[in-house]
Image (cartoon, rainbow, N blue to C red):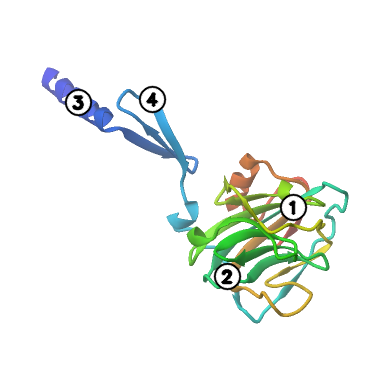
Amino acid sequence: MKKILSSLLIFLVTMLSAGTSYAGNNVIYEYDANGNLIRKSAVNVAESGYIPTEKKTFTGKEKVAINAKGVSSANNAKTTVQFWMKWNGNQIEMPFSWANSMYDLYFNDRLFGFNTGNGDLYGTSSDSVVNKWVHVSAIFTNGDTYKNELYINGVRQTLVKIGTASNRNVADSAYFSGWNNDTQYQFHGNIAELKVWNRALNPIEIESEMYKTPAIGSNLIYVY
């Protein structure tokens, strides 16, 4: 018995001296040899094998209109848009846009983020979202693009400014792939499980909603 306990103790000491890590709730916790938390990082849940059972495929020629009645037009009101996306890497295209407002999500110059049709982009690197399923949560703010928030796989992104954004509002209709002005910027890839909320979801809600289908919650106004 003493020999077994001694062996177990040696095993545990060896693990701690090398450092350990544990995963839970889409987060990896890493500890040093003294058991102190040294790093906490998000797990890329989309790379864990999740693939939506139903999806819409876009080849750069399609556009799908969305009824978003119920969003707020009030100044500084916030709207959350969530969807799963698999993008093939083409630049200068929009997976989502609000109709008649030039307020959209945009890929350009290896960045992905918010655009207001003014040669601007408020976004993050798109390198990590090419050719894989990722979950997008975008919080649009009426009248102030720089109050917007973007989450990829439940993790809030640090956004950089390119150009100067115009003041834009959300609208009661929207589009998958491109915008309503013309046939430019249409998307190449797949989109699934769109949800639109007429408020800003908090980080806990954003993560919990990733796998809820159909979504259930207050202020949910659209599910695709």
What amino acid does circle 4 point to? Asn
Q: Identify the residue position indicated by label 3 in the image.
A: 8
Viewer-side label of 2, 3: 2
Kind of element beneath mark 2: strand
Q: Identify the residue position indicated by label 4 in the image.
A: 36
* Label 3 or label 4, whichever comes before in sequence order: 3
Q: Disc number at residue 190? A: 2
Question: Which quadrant holds the N terminus?
Answer: top left
Looking at the picture, how far across and down is residue 205, in whole percent?
Answer: 65, 43
Kind of element beneath mark 4: loop
* Label 2 or label 1, whichever comes before in sequence order: 1
- Residue 192, by quadrant, is bottom right
Viewer-side label of 2, 1: 1
What amino acid does circle 3 point to? Leu
What amino acid does circle 2 point to? Asn
Against 189, is 37 above or below? above
Disc 4 from disc 1: Cα separation: 39 Å
Disc 3 from disc 4: Cα separation: 21 Å
Question: Which quadrant holds the C terminus?
Answer: bottom right
Against 3, is 21 above or below? below
* Label 4 or label 1, whichever comes before in sequence order: 4
Looking at the picture, how far across and down is residue 53, in whole percent?
Answer: 55, 65
